[in-house]
Image (tube, grey):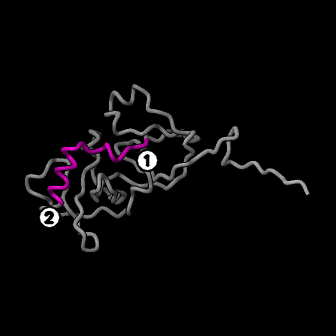
Amino acid sequence: MAQETVETDAYIDGQENESMQLVVFQLGGEEFGVDIMQVQEIIRMHQGTRIPQAPDYVKGVINIRGNIIVVINLEKILELPIKEEDDDNRIIVVEIGGNILGMTVDSVSEVLSIAKSNVEPAPDMITSKINSDFIKGVGKLDDRLLILLDLENVLTIKQLADVSEVSAARG
C-alpha cells in the first residue's frame, strides 16, 4: 500500500510555517498584539490605589486574589493620546522582566494565531514615531495590520526598577 502525502497549512514551500498566539487589544486608536505566553489574565478595569510620588505612568496598585499588582498606563508609556475610561477598558496582567504587572488598554478584542511568515519588521516610518525597541514587527492580517509589541522592551530598565520599587513598597 502506497503512503499518501497530505499537504497541510502547516507547511509552505516545504518549510514548517510556525505561528504565534497573540492577545489583540486596542490602544490610542491602534490595534496591538502581545504574545499570549506573557499574559496571565485579562480583567475589567477597576479603581486601584494611587501611590503618592509614583511615576506618572503608574496608575496605582490593585489586589488580585491577595497579590498586589502595579498597574501602568500603557498609553503614557507609548506616548499615545489618553482616552477617557469606559466599560470596555481592561487591565492585561503580564510578566515583564520577572515582574507581574497590569497594563491598561482601551479594549481587548480577541486571541488569534498568526503565521510568523505574516509578520514583517516595522517600517522606518513607524519606528520613527514609536521607539522601535517596543515593536517586534507588524502582523499582516486579511484586512488589517497589527502592531506586535515586545513586552520585554516596553519599559526601560529604569522604569522596570521603578515598578519593582513601587511593588516592593506595597508588598
Cα–Cα span, label 1 and label 2: 30 Å
Q: Secondary structure at mark 2?
A: helix
The stretch drawn in magenta includes residue 151: yes
Position of residue 150 relative to residue 95, above or below, is above
Q: Main secondary structure of the magenta part?
A: helix
Which residue sits at x=34%, y=43%?
28
- Amino acid type at mark 1: Gly
- Amino acid type at mark 2: Arg
Which residue has dot 1 on it?
33
The stretch drawn in magenta includes residue 62: no
Q: Earlier in the sequence, mark 1 or mark 2?
A: 1
Residue 158 location in percent, x, y?
Answer: 18, 44
Left or right: residue 75 versus residue 121 is: left
Which residue sits at x=59%, y=41%?
142
The extreme left residue here reads 53
Which residue sits at x=8%, y=56%?
52
Between marks 1 and 2 in the image, the one whose residue lies nearer the viewer: 2
Q: Secondary structure at mark 1?
A: strand
The extreme right residue here reads 1
Residue 90 visible in the shown view:
no
In the picture, which quadrant includes the N terminus?
Answer: bottom right
Answer few, some or many: residues within 10 Å of disc 2's Cα (few below 14, many 20 plus, some between 14 and 19).
few
Q: Which residues are magenta?
A: 148-167
Residue 68 visible in the shown view:
yes
Asked which quadrant contains residue 66, the reply is bottom left
Residue 139 location in percent, x, y?
Answer: 50, 40
Which residue sits at x=27%, y=57%?
99
In the picture, which quadrant includes the C terminus?
Answer: bottom left
Mark linked to residue 170:
2
Answer few, some or many: residues within 10 Å of disc 1's Cα (few below 14, many 20 plus, some between 14 and 19).
many
